[in-house]
Image: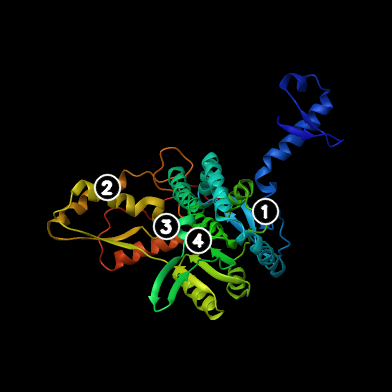
Amino acid sequence: LGRQKGTLGIPIHFSVGLFRRLPPMLRVRITHACFRRYANMGASRRISTTKLFINGEFVESEAKSWIDVYNPATQEVVTRVPEATQKEMQAAVDAASAASKAWRDTSVVVRQRVFLRLQQLIRDNEMALAESITRENGKTLADAKGDVFRGLEVVEAAANVAPHMMGETIEGLAASVDTYSIRQPLGVVAGICPFNFPAMIPLWMFPVALATGNTMVLKPSEKTPGATMLLAQLAKEAGVPDGVLNIIHGSVDCVNFICDAPAIKAISFVGGNAAGEHIHERGTKNGKRVQSNMGAKNHGTVMPDADKDFVLNSLTGASFGAAGQRCMALSTAIFVGDAQEWIAEMKPRAEALTVGAGADEGVDVGPLISKESKARVESLISSAEKEGAEILIDGRGIKVYQDP
């Protein structure tokens, strides 16, 4: 029967034997209450909210606008992400600014030790991170673990950052002239992350930024915030001081705030072309250093002297891994000369892949991030068909869940 609060608000746990010994009317009341609770759980379940992380504390936002985060496999709303207020975003920047001097003056060796601890905490929590990624992004658990592992490699590099902090000295550059250079932190920097690698890309950003003495304001994708929030908790446990790492949420207004905030000296972005061009233009106009890693797709050229099985297996993984939602995805392959005879052998390899919910055993390809993304992919297939392409295997109309 689970648990049902009594009239005093005290949780009461019932075994079947105990339930049978209760007075009949009380049994009826409890049965009706339990039925109402569990029959309506899907409709009445209180959806959790994603917190902000400001000055070392997880903070409930006072936002008026919220974004629903869906499990792509079930279309269930798993959390709600706030459109952080201007006041909240400014508080994150102020916390990063206040923490900056003490952190930059902290020995690089001490900073490295934080990331030695963080990499172990990430290893210890690999499954929790992977499950969060699968729940919000849809990718298979195997892909999600790879997402975590690739980010972990950057944390390991951050734990050995000291050699990269070395400057250069040139003696006798000219008569009575010696030169030297030193590397110094910029101060407060920001990161803006995409949905497709919820652990790896935040781990590209904040470990290196922090290990080199900067403080950071990080904005994860509003579609996949969970892994970043868990990483923030692990960073706090590893010894990252309050205010050194801060996390805000939102969409366009949040991005524009980061581009405009005077205290933020540099921005790192990974994502689509339109957003990346906007961030680069707006950020650089405000005097910031901006690195904008925008959308990309790989193309492959297959020559007839290649190893056929190696090529075809590699093409299958490159094309369908992460459901194609990555810049390394291979969207086009050109087979040259006799290699064109291999095209037909791609079909059974694709047909052998199991499409389904990422958390299910034996699934090779998880769902796309949203219904809109699925519609776009289907429109591209339809466009190719109209232009005369031969469709060897058609994935249009496939479902990994049942619509409510």
Q: Which residue is mark 4?
A: 194
Q: On the picture, is 37 further left or further right than 301?
A: right
Compared across the picture, whether 47 is left or right of 297 comes to: right
Helix, strand, or loop for circle 2?
A: helix
Depth check: 14 or 43 in front? 14
How packed mark 4 is, by other alpha carbons closer than 10 Å (few <14, some 14-19, many 20 or more), is: some
The answer to whether residue 59 is above or below residue 9 is below
Earlier residue among tags 1 and 4: 1
* Pointer 2 with pointer 1, Cβ within 8 A: no
Give whichever of discs 4 and 3 has the lower sequence position: 4
Q: Position of residue 265 (x, y in %)?
A: 57, 71
In space, the residues marked 4 and 2 are separated at their CA atoms by 28 Å
Residue visible at 69% across and 38% down? 38
Q: Amino acid at mark 3?
A: Gln
Residue in the image at 50% along x and 48% along y: 73
Of callouts 3 and 1, the N-terminal one: 1
| Type of amino acid under label 1 | Thr
Residue 225 image position (x, y, % from top left):
58, 55
Q: Tag 3, which secondary structure?
A: loop
Q: Earlier in the sequence, mark 4 or mark 2?
A: 4
- The residue at the point 79 percent across, 27 percent down is 27
* Spatial CA span between label 2 and label 3: 19 Å
Q: Considering the numbered disc 1 on the image, is that residue within a helix, a strand or a loop?
A: loop
Q: Identify whether 195 is placed above or below 255.
A: above
- Side of 82 relative to 274 (left or right): right
> Which residue lies under the disc numbered 1?
49
Please tell me how crowded label 2 is: few (under 14), some (14-19), or many (20+) other residues with Cα within 10 Å: some
Q: Which residue, given by chain and number where applicable, does mark 2 sit on?
A: 313
The answer to whether residue 14 is above or below residue 216 is: above
